[in-house]
Amino acid sequence: MRDPREELTDHIGSLRAFALSLTRNSATADDLVQETLVKAWTNIDSFQQGTNMRAWLFTILRNTFYSLRRKRKREVEDADGTMSEGLATKPDHDGRLNLRDFKVAFDQLPDTQREALVLIGAQGLAYEEAAEVCGVAVGTIKSRVGRARARLAELMELSEEESLEITDSVTQGVVGSRPAA
Amino acid sequence: MTKHMTRKQLNSRVVEEIDRNLRQAFDDMAEQPVPDRFTDLLAQLKAAEEKKNSGDQQDA
């Protein structure tokens, strides 16, 4: 049987993106990914074959993040904005949403809502999987995602009319910063 | 000022708009080339284990 650890490499990109959304700092994010990979490697026996490895890895990463954060409570969080720092995107040519506003709004979400939205909306996990990653009930995840979307829409003042506007000149301004390799 | 539609019930277009932007932002990040530190790390872990196993089991 193929060693499931062979699959770890495939998930590094997703892990980095998830870590960045939690830490809001690319150096800290990559340290977190490193620790997650070591734990996953040494604890591979606790991974159930046939289940979603990405969800399993996210659980490890998230637990590691929160236990580190509890330890380092005194340290000032170096939060210069998740999206604006690392998650730069290309302008969407048919894009209607102002990406800069989106990123600013995203960074303002409470941690619990942000991680729920990331797992469901960006990483495409099932509600059940996201609930397991976060250690909460499925209903809690659903309500957090709902509130996160509502809050984003509100922060961006997203209305029918505004969402139709082309904002290429603004989106071009956010392109350029790339995550540290 | 903009007229606010029913914000409590987001329409599916708004939800799709939000998720599309989210996916775009994260896919871009996730598709970045994997930094060497991670491929090196996995290679080291694998090498350390192979060394340990060959010691334990005295494989040919």
Image: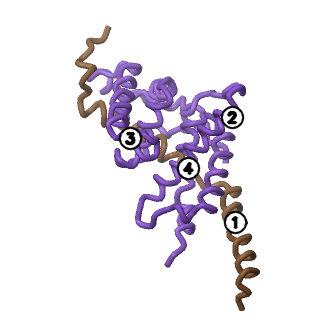
Chain colours: A purple, B brown
Cα distance in 3D space between marks 1 and 3? 33 Å
Percent x, y of residue A79:
63, 28
Q: Which x, y percent locates residue B35?
A: 66, 54
Q: Nearer the viewer, mark 4 or mark 2?
A: 2
Q: Is residue A155 left or right of residue B11?
A: right
In the picture of the structure, the residue carrying the numbered disc 3 is A121
- Of circles 3 and 4, the one toward us is 4
Q: Position of residue A31 (x, y in %)?
A: 68, 46
**Farthest residue in the top direction?**
B1
Gap between marks 4 and 2, in whole Å? 17 Å
Q: Quadrant of residue A175?
A: top right
Which type of secondary structure does the marked residue at label 1 adopt?
helix
Under mark 1, the amino acid is Leu
Q: CA distance from mark 3 to mark 4?
A: 20 Å
| Residues flagged by tags 2 and 3 on a common chain | yes
Q: Which mark is residue A120?
A: none
- For mark 1, what is the residue? B45
Do labels 3 and 4 touch, CB within 8 Å? no
Q: CA distance from mark 1 to mark 4?
A: 18 Å
The mark nearer the N terminus, 2 or 3, is 2
View extreme (bottom): residue: B60
Asked if both marks, 3 and 4, belong to the same chain, the answer given is yes
**In this rendering, the label closer to the viewer, 1 or 3:** 1
Q: Give the residue type that dot 3 points to.
A: Gly
Label 3 sits on a secondary structure element that is helix
Circle 2 sits on which residue?
A71
Q: Chain of mark 3?
A: A
Task: Give the number of marks.
Answer: 4
Note whether A12 is above or below A5 in the view shown.
above
- The kind of residue tagged 4 is Ile
